[in-house]
Image: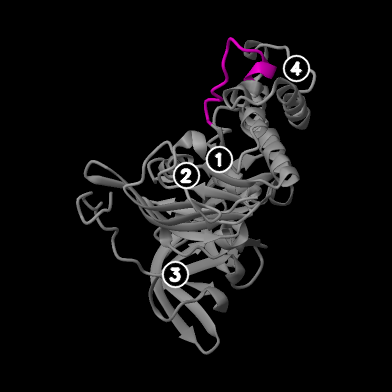
Amino acid sequence: MTKIRLAELSRAFGPVWAVRGVSLEVREGEFFSLLGPSGCGKTTTLRMVAGLERPTAGHIYFGDDDVTHTPPQHRNVGLVFQSYAVFPTMSVADNVAYGLRIRRVPGAEIRRRVAQMLEIVGLGALGARMPGQLSGGQLQRVALARALAIQPRVLLLDEPLSNLDAKLRVEVRAEIRRLQRELEITTLYVTHDQEEALSMSDRIGVMHAGRLDQVGVPDEIYRRPATRFVARFVGEGTLLDGVLVRDGARARVAVGGFEVPVGEVSAPRAGAVWVCIRPEGVRLLDRTAAGGIGGIVEYVEFVGPSLRADVRVPGLPRLLRLAGSSVDLAGRVRTGDAVRLAVDPAGVAVGPAEAPEAEPVAAGGGARA
């Protein structure tokens, strides 16, 4: 097992920094995801780790080895891409063997490793098939087997499930996680899909505008977002601006004529803040219940096991989202209904108001070659 360490890693393309000062350590045997929207710098970061992009500044370490300027073919990394990159004129077995042949591994060892990898990914009986005879999920398993066959120091995956349909994505992500745990290989996984990152990762780094906004375990990233961007990007919720006020041990955020109760653990010092109310923190009260918050249901969305509803609350500039079991909420929430809601402080995240994001820095500003 090999840890990956990035030290002030940066990459500029012309006048724009794609990655700016990223420092990060992926622990030995860890499954670490870089999560963020398109253009945030996550794939560029992975390509620098792989050696496919040269950093403008900073360093990359595998264990104690500085591999910043090591050619990609000498880094011994396993790469799995979004597009599979499977050779269409080679059999499944020959695809898996490709990296081993390039490294001039003896024939008997190639046959042993190919058979082993195909068994591990559940394709043991399909070695003689051609890629055109396989499904998308099977093709991605071939790509994964090929990456693992070379016994890489680290495994790098760039949006590997994007081309699969929703049901297959769930199946293949479970398979990738199982293999990673079984082989205990240090893994860096790039995705824009928050569900993938939350369900698969030991830890997550959320990237925004070329920088790391937050690094933490999935529960921490979701429940205690460090920035307004993380609160908006990871999970659902109603994001509002307000003023934090304290009353002894109690804290709340005033938003217009509405007050949001805040858990003491997540509350910063008093003043201007952003607040994110997660759907699971909003509870539907009985119509006859006293107290609570009154509102009108504007939209209801049925998504199989769960139901989501957006509620217009007087005094709030945005709709408040309610979510719960479709069995529990069936018939209780309909478009146009008047409802009463309660907000649980445990479902509320809050952070200090942030300055507007700075413009991208020109690449000439003191960057090291």
Q: Residue shown at 53%/56% (left/top)? A: 64
Whole-angstrom CA distance, mark 4 to mark 3, is 53 Å
Along the viewing direction, whichever of 85 and 276 lies nearer the viewer: 85
Left or right: where 352 falls relative to 88: left
Q: Position of residue 180 (x, y in %)?
A: 69, 43
Spatial CA span between label 2 and label 3? 32 Å
Callout 3 amino acid? Gly
Using a 10 Å C-alpha cutoff, classify the residue at mark 1 as few (fewer than 14 neighbours), some (14 to 19) or many (20 or more): many
Circle 3 is placed at which residue position?
A: 351
User: As shown in the figure, which amino acid type bears the numbered disc 4?
Assistant: Leu
Q: Between tags 2 and 3, which lies in front?
A: 2
Three-letter residue code for mark 1:
Leu
Q: Are marks 2 and 1 in contact (CB under 8 Å)?
A: yes
Residue at the (61%, 69%) spot, across then down: 346
Nearer-N-terminus badge (2/3): 2
Q: Is residue 98 above or below residue 74?
A: above
Q: Which residues are magenta?
A: 81-95
In this picture, residue 341 sits left or right of residue 36: right
SS type, badge 3: strand
Q: Decide if residue 264 is on the left or right side of residue 93.
A: left
Give the mark, 2 or 4, whose residue is nearer the N terminus: 2
Q: Which residue is mark 4?
A: 126
What is the distance, in whole Å, between disc 1 and disc 4 at their CAs? Answer: 25 Å
Q: Residue at x 51, y 60 (%)?
A: 215
Of discs 3 and 1, which sits in the foreground? 1
Q: Where residue 49 is drawn, which disc sits there?
A: 2
Asked if residue 209 shows in the view, the reply is no
Near mark 3 (Cα within 10 A), the count class, few <14, some 14-19 or many ≥20, is many
Image coords of residue 283 (percent x, y):
63, 62
